[in-house]
């Protein structure tokens, strides 16, 4: 099978189109023929050597965190899927398995889900990692509930797009940031207030919108995009969720101030990690997927490029302003 692999960590020019044997599913695993793999920020970070759990992978490594495609075989003990099922999937990267930039990928069964019937493979491929991260941050970490006032930093991104819509589906009030060109789009996702971070003062806008303090913040940008004294804008008992970006983290914020105000500032991965990492974010992912099936949540806009253009796609995603998903087309299914 063809796969885009790297032989060492480094820049986007490290990709090489390789011919690899088709993997075989072990017990509890599913073999998927991949139609599309999405390009996530974690992919360029993994390629660059920033994902600690890839440190002990042997080279060549196939990158890729999620995909949409068709089941072609299942391992012993798999009960939920069979050949020809149309599916979307989180990959097993970090669990010792290879990524999705390939014609076939093996993944643990819990990380696979049916492709929603109203979506094609391309739309489905936009869903897994971004929605799992959004849903887990909202349900597992922030524990958001009806009536909460929640701020999504990075409303135009893939995680932000799912987070805003899912929060509205859960009955929360939502304020989100984005750049000027995305204000209309983010408002269309259902945000009650959109703050244009290029033109407006974020702290002043939030203080006016939630004078008693925010219940939760989902920070899907990091990198010093929010004021250090952000905990001041969160009510006692509230949570600031830093979506792990591997560049900056909870230390972006004044943790003494947070402690004094009884505000939790947490990394979404550390806070929600499960004893068996196969199940990490899976339950939340399924809840958001239900909302997609009910057509309460729609997928981000996307564009499609050939698998061979993975390097160029990584460079664009690394810039941080793609405004939707880039999908790698691998097969016509
Ligand atoms: N650990 C996990 O569970 C997990 C999973 C998925 C993603 N992540 C991390 O979450 C982050 C977001 O991922 P993603 O997939 O949503 O990325 P993405 O689709 O590439 O979106 C990035 C978005 O950030 C926005 N942005 C950039 N600078 C901003 C700023 N200063 N203020 C507000 N918005 C800003 C951009 O919108 P504008 O063009 O409008 O600025 C862009 O739409 C990444 O760091 C990624 O690594 C973590």
Image: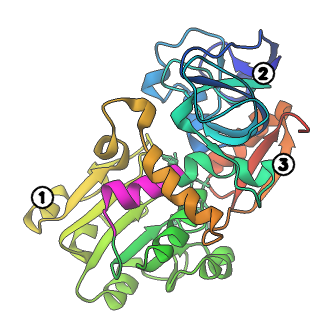
What SS does tag 1 mark?
helix
Please name the residue that numbered disc 1 is placed on: 256
Q: Quadrant of the N terminus?
A: top right
What SS does tag 3 mark?
strand
Please name the residue that numbered disc 3 is placed on: 304
Q: Does label 3 point to a residue whose CB lies under 8 Å from ligand 1?
A: no
Q: Does label 1 point to a residue whose CB lies under 8 Å from ligand 1?
A: no
Give the residue at x 70% y 42%: 87
For this view, does 256 lie left or right of residue 102? left
Q: Is residue 223 visible?
A: no
Viewer-side residue, 54 vs 123 = 123
For this view, does 219 lie left or right of residue 111? left
Count neighbours of disc 3 (C-alpha within 10 A) and say few if under 14, some if 14 to 19, many if 20 or more: some
Count neighbours of disc 1 (C-alpha within 10 A) and say few if under 14, some if 14 to 19, many if 20 or more: few
Magenta stretch in the rendered image:
132-144
State which tag comes first along the sequence, 2 or 1. Answer: 2
Q: Quadrant of residue 270?
A: top left
For this view, does 65 lie left or right of residue 136? right
């Amino acid at each position: 099978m063809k796969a885009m692999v790297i032989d060492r960590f480094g820049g986007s020019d490290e990709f090489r189109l390789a011919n690899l044997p088709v993997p075989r599913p072990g017990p509890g695993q599913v073999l998927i023929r991949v139609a599309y793999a999405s390009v996530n920020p974690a992919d360029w970070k993994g390629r660059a050597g920033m994902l600690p759990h890839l440190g002990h992978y042997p080279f060549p490594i196939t990158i890729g965190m999620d995909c949409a495609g068709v089941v072609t075989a299942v391992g012993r003990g798999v009960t939920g899927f069979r050949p020809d099922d149309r599916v979307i999937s989180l990959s097993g990267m970090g669990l010792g398995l290879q990524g999705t930039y390939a014609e076939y990928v093996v993944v643990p069964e819990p990380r696979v889900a049916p492709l929603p019937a109203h979506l094609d493979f391309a739309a489905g491929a936009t869903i897994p990692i971004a929605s799992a991260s959004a849903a887990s941050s909202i349900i597992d970490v922030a524990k958001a509930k009806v009536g909460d006032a929640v701020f999504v930093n990075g409303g135009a991104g893939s995680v932000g797009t799912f987070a805003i819509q899912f929060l509205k589906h859960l009955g929360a009030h939502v304020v989100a940031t984005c750049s000027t060109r995305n204000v209309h789009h983010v408002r269309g996702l259902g945000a009650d207030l959109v703050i244009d971070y290029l033109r407006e003062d974020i702290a002043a806008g939030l203080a006016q919108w939630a004078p008693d303090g925010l219940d939760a913040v989902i920070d899907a940008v990091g990198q010093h995009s929010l004021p250090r004294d952000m905990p001041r804008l969160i009510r006692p008992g509230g949570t600031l969720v830093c979506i792990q970006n591997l560049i900056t983290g909870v230390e972006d914020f004044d943790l003494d101030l947070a402690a004094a105000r009884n505000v939790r500032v947490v990394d979404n991965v550390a806070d929600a990690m499960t004893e068996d990492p196969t199940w990490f974010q899976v339950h939340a992912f399924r809840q958001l997927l239900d909302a997609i099936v009910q057509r309460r949540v729609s997928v981000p806009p996307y564009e499609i490029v050939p698998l061979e253009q993975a390097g160029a796609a990584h460079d664009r995603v690394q810039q941080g302003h793609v405004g939707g998903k880039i999908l790698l087309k691998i097969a016509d299914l």
